[in-house]
Image (spheres, rainbow, N blue to C red):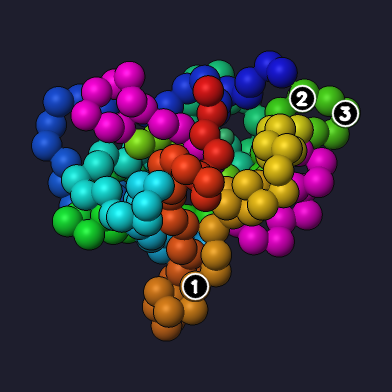
């Protein structure tokens, strides 16, 4: 299956240290991006359920209108001058990570007639070496496009597909400010999160 733009591209970072602003995609410009502000947090776990500390997570995503800030994205949706759509964070000593961003929009990808990707955030996790990089996509609960999306459906096992869907989390939802989603990532084992090869 031909991959879309967002499967084959990702942000390229420099050599600078990771800063607080790297994990808050709503504070990387002079103004705030448009869209539904969300908090995405969770844990990175190994096959025994043990937390994986100090792991670099990189994310990239479309803006709220479903447009990537990428020269080859020609979707007729507006760019947001206050949104780059890329962030990174390290898990803490307990394997916990947190991003603040806006909910990405669905976007068309021409794979078949009237093809739209469900809203998703790309996740890359780096182990101690580049060869141990794992890449997956996080989806949002209840998306009507799941049944029609060949990439989501390429994971044959329904239970495994569900592990790519974040859980709405009222506990991390902040009043008057942002909706919370929990997305735990299991690196391997029976409960592993599906990864792209
Ligand atoms: Fe994408």
Q: Which of marks 1 and 3 is nearer the N terminus?
A: 3
The residue that label 1 is drawn on is 169
Foreground: 140 or 129? 129
Magenta-colored stretch includes residue 68: no
The residue that label 3 is drawn on is 113
Task: Tell me if label 2 and label 3 are in contact, CB under 8 Å.
Answer: no
| Residue name at image x 24 percent, y 23 percent | 129
Task: Tell me if label 1 and label 3 are in contact, CB under 8 Å.
Answer: no
Q: CA–CA distance between discs 1 and 2?
A: 33 Å
Numbered disc in front, either 1 or 2: 1
Point out residue 20 in the picture as x, y percentages from the top left corner: 18, 52
Q: Earlier in the sequence, mark 1 or mark 2?
A: 2
Foreground: 91 or 108? 91
Point out residue 82 in the picture as x, y percentages from the top left corner: 39, 47
Residues in magenta, as a range: 126-149
Q: In this view, does 135 lie to the left or right of 76?
A: left
Q: Mark 2: which secondary structure? A: loop
Residue at far right of view: 113
Q: Can residue 27 be seen in this view?
A: no
The residue that label 2 is drawn on is 110
Q: Mark 3, residues whose alpha carbon is within 10 Å: few (<14), some, or many (≥20)?
A: few
- Above or below residue 92? Residue 80 is above
Which of the four quarters of the rendered structure image does ligand 1 lie in? top right
Q: CA–CA distance between discs 1 and 3?
A: 35 Å
| Residue name at image x 85 percent, y 34 percent | 114
Q: Mark 1: which secondary structure? A: loop
Q: Mark 1, residues whose alpha carbon is within 10 Å: few (<14), some, or many (≥20)?
A: some
Q: Mark 3: which secondary structure? A: loop
Point out residue 40 in the picture as x, y percentages from the top left corner: 42, 59
- Above or below residue 171? Residue 131 is above
């Amino acid at each position: 299956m031909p991959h879309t733009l967002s499967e084959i591209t990702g942000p390229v970072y420099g050599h600078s240290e990771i800063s607080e602003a790297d994990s808050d995609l709503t504070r990387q410009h002079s103004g705030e991006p448009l869209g539904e502000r969300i908090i995405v947090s969770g844990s990175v776990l190994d096959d025994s359920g043990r937390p994986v500390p100090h792991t670099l997570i990189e994310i990239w995503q479309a803006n709220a209108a479903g447009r990537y800030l990428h020269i080859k994205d020609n979707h007729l949706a507006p760019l947001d001058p206050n949104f780059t759509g890329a962030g990174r964070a390290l898990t803490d000593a307990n394997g916990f990570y947190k991003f603040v961003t806006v909910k990405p929009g669905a976007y068309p990808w021409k794979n078949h007639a009237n093809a739209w990707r469900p809203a998703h955030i790309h996740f890359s996790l780096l182990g101690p070496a580049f060869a141990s990089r794992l890449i997956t996509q996080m989806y949002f609960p209840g998306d009507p496009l799941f049944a029609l999306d060949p990439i989501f459906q390429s994971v044959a096992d329904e239970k495994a597909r569900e592990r790519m869907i974040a859980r709405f989390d009222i506990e991390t939802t902040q009043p008057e400010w942002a909706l919370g989603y929990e997305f735990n990532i299991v690196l391997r084992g029976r409960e592993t999160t599906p990864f792209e090869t």
